[in-house]
Each structure stands twice: as structure tokens, then as C-alpha cells.
Image: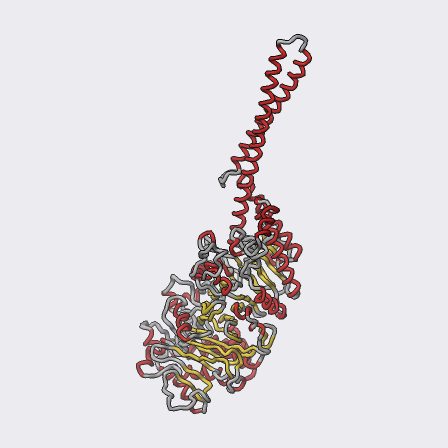
Amino acid sequence: MMANSTKLAKPNQNGKNGKNGKSLEKIVGKDARGSRVYVLSEVGYDTDYFNPDAYENLLKVMAEDKDISGILIDGAVTRLDRPEFLNDSLTYWRRSEEDCMNETESIPNKRQYKNMMETQLKILEQRIMEMKERVPQVKDVVLSIDSDDMQYTISAMVNEMLLRGQKEIKESITKLRERKKKLKKDYTKMQKDYENLESMDGSGKKKAGLTKRMRTCESKLDYVEEKIKDKADEQKLYREKKVRPAHQFFTARFIRKLYRKYQGLCDRLDVTLVTNPSIIKFNDLTIDYAHSRHATWAVLKRRDKALVESTHGKSDKLKGIDVLLESGHFGIGYKQFQKLKDSPAETNFKNQSSFDSETCDDHITIVMALPFEDQEMISGYSTGKKPIRLSGGKPMNTRKIAAMDRYKNDCVNGITVITKDEDGMVGTEWIQYRNFANGSVLKQPEEYSIICASSDEHIASPEANPIVTKGWVELYNRLLKQPTSFRGRKAFAKGLINGGDVAEANSRKWDHRYHQKRDPEEVMKENLELLTRFSPDSIDKIVELAMKMTNDSMGGSVESMAVVLDRVADYFESTLNGSLEKSRLKWLQVSTTGNHSDNVLRDLGMRESDFLQQRLKERGIETYEVGRPDYFKKNPEKDARVFLGGYSNARVLNIPDYGLDIEGKPMFGPVNLVVQHDPKGSDMRGVIGAGKNAGADLSIAGHTHDNRMRLYKTGDNTWSVAYKLATLQGVSPTEKYYAGSVPRTQAAHKLVMPMPGDFSEQAIPVTYLREQGRESLRRTVEQEM
């Protein structure tokens, strides 16, 4: 990323940027090997609540990150008209009376803001310089000054400038009037002297000299009166009328000067300056960034919902954007992997009876970053521990900043990292502030454990997507054996979580009877003709013919739950077998039931995992089942490797120490895990409530066919994770019925949680899994040939 660009404007229709005509790719990075971008939002270097110890640990983390490619700094400076929250370099709360009086005399009132801004810029420059020195491997550093704090500072300083201008002009007018008064007095005296000379003989020479002086005085009076009139007119221009030309000129001139100061700072430090919402590219990661896209600077509790809805129907506008990012201004740690539209084939339900269904690959990742601010220190203002700074009161009205609103709203805090791997898939990482404050963030494992997660496969439904589930199994088994890189270290898959609705109950769940099954005579004739003419000269042709014939078998509706549960057991065993061979994780496979199969099986006292449980029992593999009495066992979990959840309409499970190995030693965490298929509650309230009810570190749900993550506060500087899993099923009639919402999203997931408060995730689009499934078929043909 080039450092001397004052802003990164949104590309126009020609794909160019602003006046200079440079393309986005020329303005920013050229490397396309993946990206890791740290978002340092609301960092507040100049605040009284800035925690240097936590920041030091953040610098250590970034310094050790060999793959870091970018840093986005946001909210680095605080509004100057709120001295209650500024540090000792900018304020005098902790100074002696002598110091305060000396400073008052040495700094004129009209220069106070200017002096404070100069100090603020020095603090910022020192911090960024330190960061660049400590993290030399980072290629792109972006400083954004587009914020509420900057606008309020500008407004205060412009207002001060205009008021100061009025005062200075008023003082000038007063001096001019005093001079006018003196000139008039002198002129009057000269007039009297002239009258006296009139009656005297031989006074012509004196009268001539006096006349000359009187004319000079008249000229001076005319000049002073003209200056008074000009100053009076100028004074009117400085009055608080925004429609006046001078007001607009002075404001524009001030902002341009201010931006030049920041640009000079960024030029010295080789940093890119952003002054408005912009598209920023770090290597091949394209971020559409804004401090806040809301119409006001209000700190809203439900901003995430409106941000997601703003993408609905905007696929063309968002084309080429990987991440739609808003800062930590709202204090909402949020992520959603969102499908932007369905393809015509999906809308027309051409995924029925198809082994390899078409899926639209038009997605965006929506992120609301965390603010990096110390809530324990901020709480001092809200709990009355800062009475002097707040005049004995609370942070409200003119003694309030956005950080106080965030705290009131139970905001979450820490660091957000946005990644994009070599396959083009976007991921996010979230680390709570306490881990930086106490240094636990530095205690990272030598090898990371990946937990793979999926939900809502709806096996045997007309909309099931077999090629995708096949690709998911292939990917999981590969991740068990072949390491991938995470934070510069090796990472292997260690286990799998499923959020339920693996099975479908067609007629019991759906009341329509539109399932098509072709005439067998017609199919037989068609296939005989194809086979008679078939010449297997390529792998693709073999796969194509096999796919067609497999599709022939997929027509109609699968009504036998025995058939469905057999397929479910096959699916689970296809991942469990590899886990048993490669992983020492205690709970290799964790799953709960779903509402679809429960519509049939619950009446019979059965669950969608029962066939799997019986198979494992025959193999001597123990399971732990929710709702099954085990009071008669000394240690019911001792030899179990599979955790089966779901009981009645509470399709839930809880593992308080997820992450232990078979010997009871932590492979990661351990973390308190809750999985519940369909916890009731609008938006994220259900999955958050499920986590709160169990004191969980991680709460996972399925059911709604969308991928969302929201962090919720558990204490000052700590949070837990609520995570919703997407679906592996194709588009269903229910999704199209609820047309008022954004499209449902198909994906699987990779999760990493080395400790509570340190959570990373990546959504794997079904288009990628589809290709994995296809590649698996090609390899099968190669092996057979």
C-alpha cells in the first residue's frame, strides 16, 4: 500500500480512483498470497484510560506474527472538547496550582486548542513510530481519522476560531474608535486655534500650516472611519451563520490545514491516511471500511441488524468486496458470512433430485470490529470513581464521549483480525481485552487445534446437496492428516461439531407433494442409448455419465426414516473413522438433534443419532447421550468419544471442559461448550441466552441457515461467543417464502479457540466444498482406471 495517498476513494464506473486516475490495485498492495489485518479500533492513545501494559502485549503479538500484512488504526485521537477523559499530557487535573497558573499565563486562551492538538499529534506520531519499529514486517499501515471524535474536535476548534476572530476584530474596532476620538479632539482644538488666528494680524503663515494639519487630520479621520466600517462588516462575517460565505471559507480552510498536518505525519511514517469511508486493499483482501455508516454518531445496540440489511439486493454495488467493515464505535463484536443473492437455478428449484446442485458464489463477510479500550478503567467514570473529572457527577450530556455509551450498552472489547487465505476464503479472529491486560494472549500453543463444524445437511431431502457433503468429508479428513497454517504455526483438525438437522423427515415436515420421479421405462431407454455410445476417453466424461445416472436415483421423496437414519450414520462414520485414527481429543464428535427429524422420531422416543449409536455400540465405541440416566455408572464419560445431544424439544448439550484429550490434559482451552439446535429468541438472543444459561465460553446453534457470530459481555474486558452455523443444504421453499430477509447462506466452518476469550473462525463456502467433492470423484475414477 502506498503511503502518500491522502485517501482511498471508492472506485468509479471506470474502476479508477479520484482525480489521479490510478486504479485501486496501483494505490494499494500487489501481493496476492493471503492477508492478515489487525484492526486497532478506538485505541485512544491520548485518553486517561489507555492501558500501556495491554498495548505492549498487543505489540508483542503483532511483532511475533510473521504473516501480518496490514494494520488499520481507527479512533486514535479523542475529541479535545472533553478534557474529562484526556490524559495528563493534555490536561491539568493532577497538576499543582503553581503549574496550572503558570500554564494559564503562558498559553493564551485563544491558543489552548491549538496547543492541545499539537500535543495530540506528537502522541500519535510517537505511538505509530513505535509500532512501525516493533512490527517491521508489516507492509501496510493505514490511519483513519474519519470519526465522531475528529468531527467534534473540528467543530469546537472552528467555533473557537470564529469566536476568537470576532473578539479580535472587536478589540481592533475599540482601538480604532479610541483613535478616532483622539483625532476628533485634536481636530476640534485645531478649529478653535484657527478661529483665534482669524482675528490676529500677520497670522497668514500660521493659518496655512494649521490648515495643512487640519486636512491631514481629516484624512486620518476618514481612513479610521473607513477601517471601522470594514471591521464591522468583517465582524458580521464571523458570526455563527453557516450559510455565510466567510463561515464556509474559514471552515474549509481550517479542515484542509488540519488534514495537511495529518498527511505530513503519515508521510514521515510511511503510513496511508484515510479521511472518509474508503475501499482499502491489503494484498488481495479488499475491505469496504467506514467508522460508522449510520446517519448519526449515535452508539446503537442493534447496529448489526441494520448493517446486514443494508446489503440486501446490493450484490452489484458490493461486487469485488471481501469484507464490509465498521469500526469498534458501536462496541459490537459481530461477523456474518452473507450470501448476496440466489442463482436462477436455485430460485427455480433446479436443485431437486441433483447430486451436484448449482449454488451462487456471491458472498460478503460483514464485520463490526472490537474497540481496543480498557473497560475496567472506563468503569471508573460510570461508577463514580472519577468525581473530580466529572464535577462530582456522572458521564452525561457535555461530560460524555462514545466510550461511555459503549460501556452503558454492555459493549465487548479487544482486537479483531481479518484474514484471507490462499484459497480466497475470509476468516476472522477475536481476542478479548483481558487476555492482553493480563498477558495470557502471549501463551499460545506450539500447535493449534481446528474444530470443524457443520449443520443442517438435511440428508435425504429433495434439496440435500450430496456433492457438498462429500466435499466436506474429504476436506475434514485431509485436515486431520495434513497441517494448515494458523498464526504462523501448524494446525490440524481434531474433532467435529454438528448443530443438528442432519436428517430430513419429508412428508411429516412438508405438506406438499411436488416430488418428481421419472418414468423408469424412459430412464432405462435413455441410459441404454448413452451407454451404447459411451467412449470413456476422459475422466470428466465418466464422472458426467455417473452423475446423470445417480441423479436418476434421486427422484421422489425418501419416506422411510430407517433409510434416512442409515444415511446419517454413514455420514457421521465417514468423519469419525478418521478422527479415531488421528486425533486424541476426548470428544471427537459432538452433535445434537434437529427439529425436522424430531417431528417424526420424538413421538417414538427416537433420535436422529440412534442408528449411529447402535453401530458404535457394536464396534465397542462408547457414547455419552443427553437425557439417558447414568447414575449407576461410576464414571459415565470415561471411555466415551462421541457426545450425542438432544432431549425432547430441548435439542441441546453442554460440555464444560471441551478441549481435553483422552488423558484429561488440555489440547486447547478447555472451554465451556453449549450446542443447541434451535434455541428460541429473535436474531441472536436465543443462542446468546443458551450460552448465558450454562456460563458457556462458546455457544453454537444451527436451524436458521445463516452464519452469524456475536460476542456478548460476561464482565469488564471479557466476553463469550455466540455462533450460528450455516447450512449445507441447497435453497428450500421455506427460504423463498420468507422473502423479506436476506438470502440464507450455505457453508461449513473451521473454528479455533485456544483459550476462553480467543476465538477464530472461517466460513467455507459450499462452492469450495463442491469443488472438493468433484475432485474426490475424479480421484476415484483415476484409481479405478
Residue 572 percent across, percent down from the top left: 45, 82
* The one of 303 and 741 positioned closer to us in this rendering: 303
Q: Taking 306 as reference, is 423 above or below it?
A: below
Q: Residue furthest top?
A: 201
Residue 716 percent across, percent down from the top left: 48, 67
Residue 450 percent across, percent down from the top left: 53, 77
Residue at 58% in and 23% down: 184
Q: How many marks?
A: 0
* The quadrant where residue 511 appears: bottom left
- Quarter of the image with the C terminus is bottom right
Q: Taking 221 as reference, is 712 above or below it?
A: below
* The one of 207 and 37 positioned closer to us in this rendering: 207
Question: Coloring scheme of the render?
Answer: secondary structure
Residue 766 percent across, percent down from the top left: 49, 71
**Residue 312 appears in the picture as rendered:** no
- Quarter of the image with the N terminus is bottom right
